[in-house]
Amino acid sequence: MAGGGSFDTFPKLLLRNAAQFGAHPAFRHKDLGIWQSWTWAQVAEIVRAYAAGLHRLGLQPGDTIAVVGSNRPKLYWTMMAAQMLRAIPVPVYAEAMADELAFVLAHAEAKLVAAQDQEQVDKVLSVSDRLPQLDKIVYDEPRGLDGYDRSRTIAINNVIEEGRAGLAADIALRKRIDDFVQAGNGSDVAVILYTSGTTGASKGVTLSTQGCIDAAIDTTRFDGLTHEDVVLAYLPLAWVGDHYLNYVQGLVAGFCTACPESSDTIEQDRHEIGPTFYFAPPRGLEAMLTRLMIRMEDASLVKRRMFNYFLEVARLHGEQVLTGRPVPLSGRLLYALGRLLVYEPLKNALGLSRVRVAYTAGEAIGPDQFAFYRSIGLNLKQLYGQTEAFLYVTCQPDGAIYSDTVGPAAPNVDVRIAESGEVQFRSPGMFVGYFKDPAKTAEAMTPDGYVKTGDAGFFDEKSGHLKIIDRAKDVGRLTDGTMFAPKYLENKLKFFPNIKEAITFGDSREFVCAMLNIDPVAVANWAERNNVAYGSYQELAGHPLVYDMVAKDVAAVNRSLVEEKALAGAQIRRFLILHKELDADDGELTRTQKVRRRFIAERYAPLLTALYDGSYEADISTEVAFEDGRKGTIAARVKIRDMQATGAAESLGKAA
């Protein structure tokens, strides 16, 4: 594995990779069904020409350039070229609505925008009157952009070609680019990443070049990543996970970053590219497992029986085999047979055959799902992180994996629990501050230099690993004093494949209630097998048999809480199934798909009132945003279902 050494900036790492791994693939991209590849030597030449072209467009050290779109080599190269000029890239979520985009571009004072395609160019142009500092838009995909104003828009290919021509003809330009690279140092701002805005307006997190590189050196060594590895880059460019796991670790380790053709082809592209290092959020892993189980429902009786038999073998012995712990000979033989007949074909069907290390993070993953993947031989681990940490705060080491913890502190990270129960950390990659917001920066730090995560947690006594309970400010109490940890309850609900999203309420109230989204794939498959007719998501969500099915899942959560003394009284007494899926475009989720609980409480106030006033149905009319920017309204009469408390909570209720 390549170490960072004296390479304290990304351009220096790029040139090192071109020298050490020049013939190895650095990027791949599937376009029109065909994989294209670029070596590190080719990427270094392209990025240098691109930097020269951007410089001729007026990009200077300290300027910001926004990057808007999906995972594309030219958008990654935009960040490299900007950093070569000591300018600052600002990735923006491709799905951001025009107003969200305008906020980030204005706040970051973006001088240039690199956009993927016509859709993103149009969004930028639609808010350009709010962006007086914006000079030009460069774009990757030219389709549909022929008639656009050339004084405002220019193709990235043309910028690169003009830069290449300029380098060939102008000695002074060549020297200027070289001087920029040599003048770069570890204290430069590497990138500004905007937070998802779960608890308010997005904040621009500034990260230093040296901090990013030091953090990535630690984790590439931790997981043994080298230039021989391959990743599939499908996570949002603006999310810290993509920037860390793919962009920065790619430059540090020298591995190949493969970009899918589109969001619709990720599964097929994963099969074809065969990543060796892989990240998937829990909802992605759960969706893969749901699709797999749906396919098994349609398999022959013999295949289903074989599948279920060897899954039981994997449940008994898979974790021990994966971690090299002793297993009886009979168990080893059965597991080896299961690997041949079931486990390897399963991993191949999921496109995970070559994965050496896989991570999940962002939300808690169900223990059953986590155990399933590990039992069939996938080295799946969990990490806990934040944008302000440049991702890693904790991560699980091989051989010490627990489904209910997120591991010990990551290499060279110091984690502590404050008296209030809040998790706090110091790390190599910790942020420099919030862009243009020193007050918020000071608020996020302790006097002795730790970052306040805002999450409540504790270290498990047996393993010493960290457990996260909830956002510290979201942990509340019922009126009888019972602890109410909404995210903990919501994650328990989402462990069931029928439930996609959950929002729980209970702080300063007599009991807990929940608003739920069903998983349309899992529940639609159930409806098909049970001859349940429906015409829309709204009809399916309101069907009495769907309520019956979901009620069983809620009852199972209540039973599990009986064993947890602190939360036994926080069982769910009433629930409803929302008439629409929660959507980031409607403000209900962040761009990283986290629920905005306070916003939902306000948006669905009539439903929340009905949950607590004893009503059994309530009318709601909800404004929704369509992809083309139009607004519409969905109206429904939503049913409410009572649930019985069990065990200790039932006894407490009778006593009260």
Image: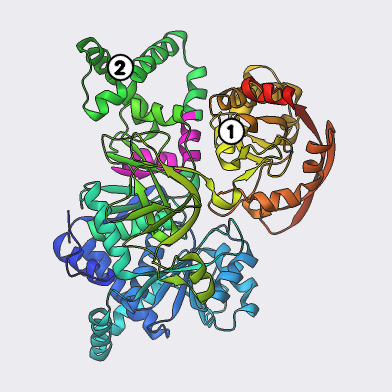
Span highlighted in magenta in the image: 266-289
Q: Nearer the viewer, residue 169 or 171?
A: 171
Which amino acid is tagged 2?
A: Gly
How many circles with numbers are drawn on the protein?
Answer: 2
Res. 338 mark: 2
Q: Is residue 225 visible?
A: no
- Picture coordinates of residue 467, whole percent (x, y): 43, 41
Q: Nearer the viewer, residue 201 or 153?
A: 201
Which amino acid is tagged 1?
A: Leu
Q: Is residue 167 above or below residue 406?
A: below
Res. 567 mark: 1
Q: In this rendering, which labeled residue sits more in front, label 1 or label 2?
A: 1
Q: CA distance from mark 1 to mark 2?
A: 39 Å
Inspect the magenta stretch and tell me whether residue 283 lies in it.
yes
Disc 2 packing (10 Å; few <14; some 14–19; many ≥20): many
**Principal secondary structure, stretch drawn in magenta:** helix
Q: Is residue 115 above or below residue 419?
A: below
- Picture coordinates of residue 299, whole percent (x, y): 47, 16
Of the 4 image quadrants, the one containing the C terminus is: top right
